[in-house]
Amino acid sequence: MRPFLRLLLFLVICVGLVFIAGFISRTGWFNGLVQPSLTAINNTEVEIEEIVPADGLHPVVADYTEKLIEEAEAIGISILITDGYRTPEEQDRLYQKGRDQHGRIVTNAKGGQSYHNFGLAIDFALLDEGGEPLWDIAYDGNENGEPDWFEVAELAKELGFEWGGDWANFTDYPHLQMTFGYSIEELQHAHTEFEKSELP
Ligand SMILES: [Zn+2]
């Protein structure tokens, strides 16, 4: 083959590969393979700087919380959001529950170790017919043969939340979180960096 033709063939193959790669990345199915996180589910990408520092529920999490309430309502389940953003101090107090304070242990996370501390987690409870909160995971208020609690968890997962009820080591049925692919360590690191940058 003449050198010119060889070069031309090479260029055609290159352009073809770039085109195919572009097509595959646009279809989105590849995202699920490399990053099976929230981004793949609802296409919301959040920079870590938009999370840290947190002083309330992250707006994206707040939006999806509203959606969850509406979707649950649509299938006859009323829910109550019992907790959202927690300061590290509030988290520390919760951690002491069941340890040096009376009661059941409710968390294994100290201040700064929970997604609640970064505005990325909520806790929910069901509301009974009288509008009273209910923590009965077997309750079937909409009488469709399925426990309401698990129906809510399913809706939440479809919206991109991770559910604490799926955790093997510390099952936390009321807990829902959106991590946006960030680990607690990454969030803590970003938080430390932010505090440093705030120093005079
Ligand atoms: Zn929680």
Image (cartoon, rainbow, N blue to C red):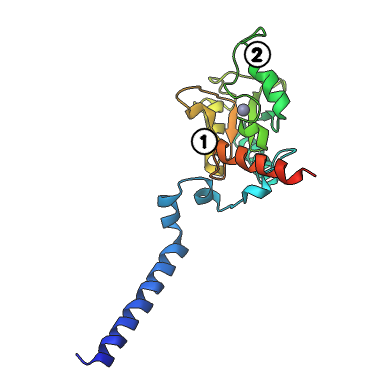
Query: Residue 154's mark?
Result: 1
Residue 55 vertical placement versus 97 (above, below): below
- Three-letter amino acid code at the position of disc 1: Glu
Measuring from the top left, give residue 111's x and y in whole percent: 66, 26
Name the secondary structure under disc 2. Answer: loop
Task: Name the residue at 51% across, 23% down.
Answer: 171
Instruction: Report whether residue 156 is seen.
Output: no
Residue 73 image-quadrant placement? top right
Task: Name the residue at 62% across, 24% down.
Answer: 110
Query: Residue 71's mark?
Result: none
Local packing at callout 1 (Cα closer than 10 Å; few below 14, some 14-19, many 20+) is some
Residue 13 vertical placement versus 75 (above, below): below
Measuring from the top left, give residue 32's x and y in whole percent: 43, 51
Q: Residue furthest front?
A: 200
Query: Residue 97's mark?
Result: 2
Instruction: Report whether residue 26 is seen.
Output: yes
Local packing at callout 2 (Cα closer than 10 Å; few below 14, some 14-19, many 20+) is some
Between residue 70 and residue 64, name the one nearer to us. Answer: 64
Between residue 104 and residue 9, name the one nearer to us. Answer: 9
Residue 58 image-quadrant placement? top right
Q: Is residue 147 left or right of residue 133?
A: left
How much space separates mark 1 and mark 2, taking CA atoms?
29 Å
Measuring from the top left, give residue 168's x and y in whole percent: 45, 24
- Three-letter amino acid code at the position of disc 2: Lys
- Quarter of the render that holds ligand 1: top right
Residue 23 vertical placement versus 54 (above, below): below
